[in-house]
Amino acid sequence: MTYRQLPDIMYAEVHPTPVSRAELVVFNDPLAEELGLDISLWKNPELLAGNFVPKEFTPIAQAYIGHQFGYPTMLGDGRAILLDEVLSPQGERFDIQLKGAGRTPYSRRGDGRAVIGPMLREYLVSEAMHALGIPTSRSLAVVLTGEPVYRERAFPGAILTRVASSHLRVGTLQYARSKNVIKEVSDYTIARHDPLCKEESEPYLCFFQEVLSRQAKLIALWQAFGFIHGVMNTDNMTISGETIDYGPCAFMDTYRADQVFSSIDQTGRYRYSHQPLIAKWNLARLADALIPLIDREEQTAIDKLLGVLNTFEEKYREEWRLQFGKKFGLVNPSKEDVAMMEAFLELLEKEEMDFTNSFLQLSDDPFALLFPSEKGVNWQNAWRRRVKENSTPEDAKTLMLSANPRVIPRNILLEEVLGAARSGDIAPFKEMLEIVTHPFSAKVPEKYLQSSPSDKKFVTYCGT
Ligand code: AMP
Ligand code: MG
């Protein structure tokens, strides 16, 4: 495991705590194949539950800080254990982690465990994100542990096997800086994610720029699919640009710029419209951590980092324009088109319309009137004119249908299938998983298409 090359302070050696009865609930065969995993080893519920750890594995929990809702706390993997790193057939390195595998030195007052509902929720939402084309950690399996886990009441305990191109977070580098090992950890991170920066005259600045670009793209993709992460603390923002930590996240049905789902986000810090702003705020924390690597003169280092940090808005707007452009059938949207696209979102919000379904209706039939108001009719006419100038109707439609999913994991339905799974019926979950991992397919049962007006008041919880 390459992570163990890092200074000891960065991790703790720890073994999963065995459970009483491991039972496989869901396993991701296509992912296992993609990663070239040996099925006879990895599809074994005893391994996935942490009861059996091959001798050559040397599991650890990682240490990191997290700015949680703006305030820093010492965290670390409190219930996740990094089992091993694997190399895919293409030579790409991946972490395989068990989430809910027992206490670690970073557990604080937590029990190190997880329950079935939130683990299945992460499995389904992360796999749906992947199918939508959004960079994300993946889910290999969920197992039941045969042990109760106490939250508001007793729930069946479960463990999720999470796969990611690494679990390096903004908070990992913040922690490294606080322990005076920022150079070692940054060099490792660069070797793992941005090896080309090593050749640059300013490798650490190059690295910062790369992380920033990945985040700008990621957030634009979240916005394009109506995804609200819900807990964008610095420990939940990866260096790889993959979405991580599926606690209180949710896709919105009705479009509302200020939508918040998370029960603990009282001030709306992580609301939909704030996601780009928060990404930049988190990147500023990363910049803080990198200061000593940039220049001996602190002010010079800060100026250089700020120079990069301030490219965020532009990068983000560019990504937003490209992503939303596709949704409107525009290959090369101009700056003026941005105003047209934003006007659409305002109309959606005013008419309290469904985000996903409205884009889909425009894609399926650009002539069917979407909005009842005169303003809306005018908008649609103007939009159709722009599409005509930009490409052929056929090309526009193909583009739109590749960017506007027919189905997203809708909250009310997801709760229903998780409820069934909690009481032992996994079939509805598996059906929904199959549907949401083919989001652009033309054949989707009617119930997955329905927008729920009560979705606005839907509440999510940090999945403990
Ligand atoms: P999160 O809000 O999910 O990002 O979690 C914040 C921190 O709390 C992370 O360091 C987790 O490892 C830790 N944590 C969450 N749930 C538990 C638990 N049940 N036991 C121990 N640590 C936990
Ligand atoms: Mg987290």
Image (cartoon, rainbow, N blue to C red):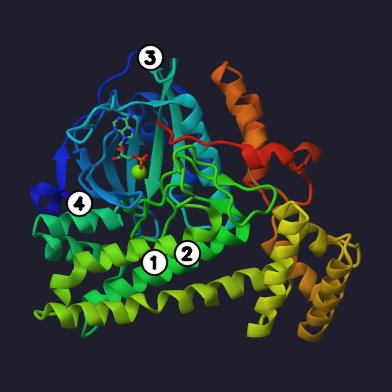
Decide if ligand 2 comes within 8 Å of the CB at mark 1. Answer: no
Query: Could you tell which of marks 3 and 4 lies nearer the N-terminus?
Result: 4
Q: Is residue 13 above or below residue 322?
A: above
> Pointer 2: what residue?
276
* Res 159 → quadrant: top left
Indicate the position of residue 462 as horizontal and vertical percent values.
43, 36
Q: Residue at x 10, y 59 (%)?
A: 181
Q: Which mark is residue 280?
A: 1
Q: Secondary structure at mark 3?
A: strand
> Pointer 4: what residue?
3
Drawn side of residue 407 relative to residue 229, left or right? right
Whether the residues at callouts 1 and 2 have beta carbons within 8 Å, the answer is yes
Q: Which mark is residue 147?
A: 3
Indicate the position of residue 354 as horizontal and vertical percent values.
74, 51
* Res 386 → quadrant: bottom right
Decide if ligand 1 comes within 8 Å of the CB at mark 3. Answer: no
Query: Could you tell which of marks 4 and 2 lies nearer the N-terminus?
Result: 4
